[in-house]
Amino acid sequence: MMRFARSVVRRGAVIPGSMGADLLEKAESGEMQRSECPALMIDYLAPSLDTTISAIASALMLLAQHPDQWAALKADPSLIPNTVNEVVRLESPLRAFARYVERDTEIGGVSVSAGSRVAVFYASANRDERVWDDPTAFDVTRDAAAQLGFGQGAHGCAGQGLARLETQSILRSIVSRVDLIEITGEPTWGLNNIIHKLDHLPLRLTASGKDQ
Ligand code: HEM
């Protein structure tokens, strides 16, 4: 991928107006080094595709499994941004990242010594029964803004604005056009250490009478 990204930068092979074009313009104007562009392009690509694809697939699966929630969304599409939070909460696309422990400390009654690494399991935090009522329930009306599936702090997900936009766009484009979302076969989950994602999700979408 690095080789590919370098050749994209060398050839200037980016779509006008794209995020890649943005980077090359910044290099051109001296705001950053051209040598930084390939790694940054990979930062746009590597963490962005499977995560968002996972969120979109999980959204469709959950809405198919919970027709009452799909009906709630159809009745009030202003719930779509919150629905994305609720989907990322319940099916957290990123399994875990690690944190380096700088000084001896204690987490939840467990001593952790400086120099250790701690695995941060997003799905676990997102189902913490001390924070969430009925944590395993899918409820598009609960306020899910506090979910941690995009991480938090200085290294919180840099692309969450785009991921939210993409997932919301899919839901907005079908909310008035589709009456029924049905699962027509067994969904299967991928075997992947990093991303929690569906490999296969056979669906049938039934169009609503009116097309808007
Ligand atoms: C639903 C989709 C996504 C999920 C669930 C997700 C989740 C995450 C998580 C949990 C982190 C780590 C945060 C931390 O360490 O505290 C992260 C980091 C990051 N994400 Fe995403 N992400 C998604 C989509 C995207 C997209 C679309 C992009 C780029 C266009 C992106 C770019 C990044 C980058 C560059 C970082 C590293 C930030 C840093 O270390 O400073 N992500 N993401």
Image (cartoon, rainbow, N blue to C red):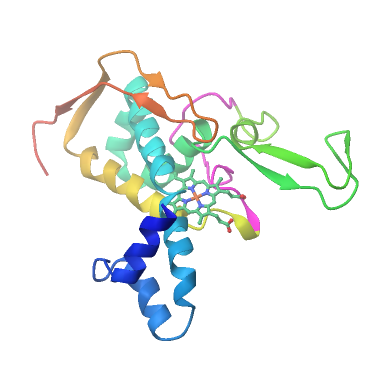
The C terminus - image quarter: top left
| Residue at 37% across, 25% down | 199
Find residue 89 and report its horizontal and vertical position in percent.
52, 36
Viewer-proximal residue, 151 or 33?
33
Is 62 placed left or right of 150 in the picture? Answer: left
Q: Residue at x 43, y 30 (%)?
A: 197
Q: Is residue 47 above or below residue 190?
A: below
Picture quadrant where residue 53 is located:
top left
Q: Is residue 141 magenta?
A: yes
- Residue 74 position, x and y percent, is 27, 36
Figure check: 160 above or below 184: below
x, y percent for residue 180: 22, 25
Residue 210 colored in magenta in the image:
no
In this rendering, does residue 19 appear at all?
A: no
Magenta segment boundaries in residue numbering: 134-153
Left/right of residue 76 with respect to residue 44 in the rendered view: left
For this rendering, which residue is in front, 132 or 94?
Answer: 94
How would you classify the magenta stretch by its main secondary structure?
loop
User: Residue 63 falls in which quadrant of the image?
Assistant: top left
Q: Can you give x and y, in whole percent of width and height, for residue 129 in the image?
A: 67, 28
Q: Is residue 210 left or right of residue 20?
A: left
Q: How many marks?
A: 0
Which residue is at 19% across, 39% downward?
Answer: 176
Vertical arrangement, residue 2 with respect to residue 126, above or below: below
Q: Is residue 175 visible?
A: yes
